[in-house]
Amino acid sequence: MIVVNTWIDTTPPPQVEAIREDLTKNKVPILAALAGPDSGAYSNEADVREPNFQTTFFGTHFDRLSTIKSKYDPEGMFIVQAGVGSEHWDTDGICRLS
């Protein structure tokens, strides 16, 4: 099953945000409920706002990947949205969380 959200180029940013929020808060939870626990996601087309990205995208491998990242990036400077280590940064990737 695939869920698609689209908008035209002239859609105002607040409306785009509402469309994206609808996917994250309403549609993805329905798909997750249908798929069952630990069903995962195809990360190339996943929602970067996935609230449980550690489990959904990385499953049981997250802790090991976090350890590897700490070894090779001890300052935690290399981040991507919804990637290993991003949980230590704000959603914009600008400020570290305490």
Image (spheres, helix red, strand yellow):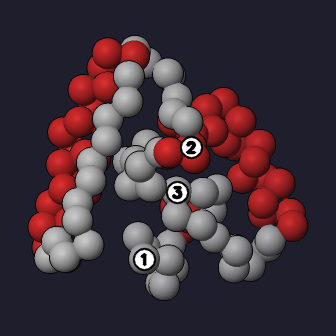
For discs 2 and 1, the disc positioned in front in the rendered view = 2
| Residue at 50% over, 45% down | 45
Q: Is residue 6 left or right of residue 15?
A: right
Q: In this view, does 90 lie to the left or right of 19?
A: right
Q: Which of marks 2 and 1 is nearer the N terminus?
A: 2
Q: Looking at the image, is 64 positioned above or below residue 83?
A: above
Q: Which of marks 3 and 1 is nearer the N terminus?
A: 3
| Residue at 32% over, 15% down | 34
Q: In which quarter of the image is residue 49?
A: bottom left
Query: Residue 83 appears at what percent x and percent y?
Result: 60, 57
Query: Residue 23 appears at what percent x and percent y?
Result: 25, 46
Per the model, the C-alpha gap separating discs 2 and 3 is 10 Å
- How many residues crowd mark 2 within 10 Å: few (<14), some (14–19), many (20+)? few
Tell me the residue that label 2 is attached to: 43
Identity, as a three-letter code, of the amino acid under mark 2: Ser
- How many residues crowd mark 3 within 10 Å: few (<14), some (14–19), many (20+)? many
- Label 1 sits on a secondary structure element that is loop
Q: Looking at the image, is 50 positioned above or below residue 27?
A: below
Identity, as a three-letter code, of the amino acid under mark 1: Asp
| Residue at 48% over, 84% down | 94
Q: What label does residue 41 carry, if any?
A: none
Q: Quadrant of the N terminus?
A: top left
Q: In which quarter of the image is residue 70?
A: bottom right
Q: Can residue 31 be seen by looking at this rendering?
A: yes
Per the model, the C-alpha gap separating discs 3 and 1 is 11 Å
| Residue at 16% over, 71% down | 11
- Label 2 sits on a secondary structure element that is helix
Q: What label does residue 92 carry, if any?
A: 1
Q: In this view, does 82 lie to the left or right of 92?
A: right
Per the model, the C-alpha gap separating discs 2 and 1 is 19 Å
Query: Residue 81 appears at what percent x and percent y?
Result: 52, 64
Tell me the residue that label 3 is attached to: 82
